[in-house]
Amino acid sequence: MEIPYEVTPRRDTGLYNAKLGVWLFLASEVMLFGGLFSAYVFLRMGVQPGVDNPWPWGVSVHKNFVWLGAINTIVLIASSVGVVFAWVALKERNWRRYQIYMYFVVACAVIFMCIKSVEYNSKLTKHHGIKLVDNSVMEGVIKDKTDQVRFSGDKLTFSLQGAVPAVLSDFTDESFPAFKVTEGPEELVGNEIKSASEFKSWFAKGRRLAFEKLTEERKRYRGELASGKGNPTPVSVSSSVTLVSSAPFAVSGNPRKLIGHNETTMNYRDAVRVEGKLVSDDVMFEVHEVDLQLVVPTKQPESIVWSVINDKEAKKHFFDLKEKKYNELIAYYEKHGGVVPEAQLRGRYLNVQYVHVAAEGHGEEHGEAKHGEVHASEPKESAGGGESEGHHGPSRVIQVPRDQIKFMSNHGPRYGTYYAIYFTMTALHGLHVVGGALVLLFFAVFGKKLYLKNPEHLANRVEVGGLFWHFVDLIWIFLFPIMYLL
Amino acid sequence: MSAATAHEHSEAHGHDHHEHHDPFWKKYIFSTDHKVIGIQYGFTALLFLAFGFFLMMVMRWSIAYPDRAVPLLADWPWFQAWLDDEGKVTGDLYNMFGAMHGTIMVFLGIVPLAFGAFGNYVTPLQIGAPDMAFPRLNMASYWLYLLGGVLMFVSFFLPSGAAKAGWTNYSPLATTTDLHYGSLFWTGQTQWLVAMALLISSSLLGAVNFICTIINLRCKGMTWMRLPFFVWAMLVTGFLLLLAFPPLEVAAIMQLMDRLAGTSFFVPTGLNVSGMSFDAAGGGSPLLYQHLFWFLAHPEVYVLILPAIAIVAEIIPCNTRKPLWGYKTMVYAVMVLGFLAFIVWAHHMYITGMGPAVSTFFQTTTVLISVPSVILITSLLISMWGGSIRFNVPMLFATAFIPMFGIGGLTGLPLAFSLPDLHLHDTYYVIGHFHYVVAPGTIFALFAGIYHWYPKITGRMMSSRLGHLHFWPSLLFMNGIFAPMFFQGMSGFHRRAFDGGKAYEQISSQIFAEPNSFLANLAEMFHVIDADAPLRMIDLNLVTSGSAWLLAIFQVPFIVNLFISVFVGKKINRDNPWDATTLEWATPTPPPHGNFATEPVAYRGPYEYSVPGAPRDFTPQFETDPGLVAGAEHNSEPEEDLAVSHH
Amino acid sequence: MADASHDLSKTKKSYAAVGIALLVFTVVTVTIGLAPIFDMGPPGPDAMDFVLGLSVAAVKASLVALIFMHLNHEKGLIYKILLFTFLFFLGLMILTIFADTDPILEQFETLKTTRGWLMDKPR
């Protein structure tokens, strides 16, 4: 059996099957990315000034990565050209040149993904933000994973129903403490658990036990109920167990898994309680920028961020810079006739400034004018040039009390809707790049057999793979300006 | 040349070529033959339909008898975790079953049966193609679908149970459900999203394959206006799936990000969950989810209904021995329907507080879309006018489809207008409305299709006696289930009340029929109420639930029929047992891999029944007969037939 | 189609030309985003940036689609499919915005929600 129009196009439609198939697939891809672009517009339009996190301006987020984005655009364009030349080479029956072009395309894809991972890595590990309870925001770096709650525990209480406790993943393997069961179903009391894997199998056993007891109890209850003897004793099965460790164990609680902690206990979202002693829950933070966009201008000088930073010079620097820019704005709008729009007054330009918290003993020596100019968060000028904070004297890491923190995160997808859509779209696009590159690589490496048999068939395949590849390029052509520039 | 000789030839060939070379697993399990894949789709979908039906029966117990323990199930180990101490259904279980009933019925039951099974089996045959355009892709679609289905099924056995936030999975409820489990990935809510992503991918691949097959693989002479209506409907359905599913995939990806990566796509600023501030950046929009979801889910309704109409449109002309009335009109109507299906989605969202201008737009488009729907149904109805109708089992189901779908469609009108919708939203009225469209509507059409094409697939007829035993009670009990819902809905019964509205004192005292009236006496006869008591709205729960269980019992004849007839059904003695005209009847029975014994040619339109002057009352598309008036002129210029008709 | 070697060399030239045009347009896009000359106001994107940036992107996209993806050689069928796709894409883009900004509700100042950058005019 042979499927017609696999290689030669059908006369009335002018298409061979694969080409039609890929165009249809691309139509659905248009709707896929269309949905995401529409989400982008929806979320960006939906930002309520003063309530939601402001939508950052691409350049202000990416700073020197704008150039990497531009290089990526060029890389993708080059690869697109490569694909069409590979196709032409096949049409000219030049296998060697075809292969060279295809390898060039795959190399471009690899370069693209490498640049992307540099970007991702920087956002995920080198940039953090902390939103304080009055909505003032500090941007910088969280030091030494201090966003985790450091706790020294000796007792663990949880239920045997449900899933394996999340606390398990917060122990490191070598530091797993030896536990002894002190309370719980009598069959389990006295059990000893020495490693994480042992814990898992023990938990499964316990869960089965608790479940069997519950079934039995219910059978009794229903039986008594059916026999009609007044009020039967209600079902009561305790599935709660307590584990005590021989020596205090260190555990760092992931704040996303916790629902609360105090000096002696730490409560996990899945109802696991760790008892012991709190070591520290302060966040050590290296401040780079202060963002007061969500604070009303008149309230900004009293904002909590200043008591957290507690450096008069830094605060003065912030407001000096703001005033300078404000005057520039006034001058600009006077020249062009008009008032400064409210969006400008409340926006990033005036309300986000670089601050340098000098190490003890350094604060006085640095004149304000000296580094104010360079550090200022002036996106237009600084956008392209790399902002290196290194050569301004040592910067003091400040201590942020946890009860002042409303929200904290790295500049990953959690950090706001912009970051969410940025990561989702670029990651999905990246998946397309990887998928497309693999297919093209396959054609380049294993295409020889088909080439010798039916070169036109291979040319068709490359054309169709190329269609997908150009589409991936086309998506990036739109992603680059809306994510990096505008 | 007779089809029978061709048949013998190809059977001899078939034995030579396939049975010896292909091992069992390649021929029946990892098969690339569209017919085997169609049957695989069919059986899997029927299994899921049965499972979805089972979920519904448990829910109906909780609604009818909220105070009593569930019979039979209370001792099953799995139910221990979800029933309460007395063995009654808990709210969690009801929510889980409700969400999964919807999901399974729509995405794992009806769409795969209608589009996957019938589409796969019949479409290539009707256009005279040897197989789908991409047979291996076809196999991949099935396996992706199966994987998604298995994942949905397995999610019941996770500690968190399956998804509980309704089949619509609205955020932020769906985002914040089950967050207290250690591993968020292995919660039912997350697995729902993962499984949906797989199902969507499967549907997308399937849609690409179908459209490509229909456009490029039509046989010689099969011009656009000679395509059977079934193929047209499949083409439009394919486009609906192709273009409407990606936005849902986007929504699923974004909700997955919200759950796993902590993003705030659908999480508004300042969200509190059980009294605690939700730890997310905020700034997202729950409304965005609804837009993306309904952008798919409304066209999805037409994905459910178009194949049904298509099947009925094949069965009615065949059994009335008359051409399909208004074939061209129906083709254009189905295209308009497909187009309009994309711009009505927000009528599901009137109560989200959309402004009057927007809701006016969507009310208008919603009313507009009823025009092509009515054209389709009216054409089917008129097709029967004056015909000498053979009321065999497929025709019974097809005939019943029309009024049932009609009731479903007409009761949709009040929901199309924002004002009545404010009252009816999320009540049993809505449930009644769309179930009339999908259950006695689509499912009847699917039954009709199974009875109709069964002889082609197996070479034997299904038992007519058992078919009647299946049809009449099904018709009765389908109405018994869904008709009371309209009355309950209008008096305000909410669809998500797991105790069937018991909590609403005010509602439960509403009277449906006065004491000693006809309906009350009838209800008393069936022990629904006591003598001299009024029939209250809440008593209708028993009518509905009772009908549902009886409906389940009367599916047994069908199941028996389906399996037994393979072995003991009456053997058919020719390839075209119904004297039908379309190309699938030109193949040997059952069709071998590669379908046709000789390359088929379409000489005329698809529904040439009772052509004046013709020797028989049907003139098949595939038979060349110079004595006939119709189609004679086409024979001389077969080349021209290949040109695309512009429309 | 392009069987003759003459045709192929012509095709190659057009591919190279399009590649160069795309590179030039990329430079233009970056300039629009970064250089102050195109800015209508002080730092931050403004309406003109969007119009220019997206128009350039649209030109680039159509070059890729027409030349690289051979749309200029295709028959009507694909255009029909793409036309419908584009219409629904537009629906997806416009109606989500439309659903958020109702022209009738806009008349009532009290109900009007404050909107971000695109709607802001100097008061």
Image (tube, grey):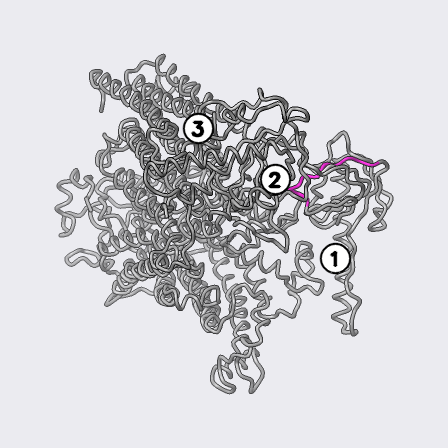
Residue A335: horizontal and vertical position, in percent? 33, 36
Q: Residues within 10 Å of mark 2 (few under 14, many from 20)?
A: many
Circle 1 chain: A
Residue C82 sits in quarter: top left
Foreground: A378 or B314?
A378
* Residue carrying label 1: A215
Which chain does the numbered disc 3 sit on? A
Residues beneath discs 3 and 2 located on the same chain: yes
Q: Which residue is mark 2?
A: A305
Q: Position of residue B635 (x, y in %)?
A: 15, 43
Q: Nearer the viewer, mark 1 or mark 3?
A: 3
Q: Which labelled disc corresponds to residue B452?
A: none
> Between residues B632 and A308, which one lies in front from this camera angle?
A308
> Which stretch is magenta?
A248-258
Q: Is A254 a magenta residue?
A: yes
Circle 1 SS class: helix
Q: CA distance from mark 3 to mark 2?
A: 42 Å
Identified at 56% across, 59% down, the residue is B54
* Residue kind at label 1, given as amino acid type: Thr
Q: Which residue is mark 3?
A: A433
Q: Residues within 10 Å of mark 3 (few under 14, many from 20)?
A: many
Q: Earlier in the sequence, mark 3 or mark 2?
A: 2
Local crowd at mark 1 within 10 Å, few (<14), some, or many (≥20)?
A: many
Find out whether the residues at labels 3 and 2 contact each other: C-beta distance under 8 Å. no
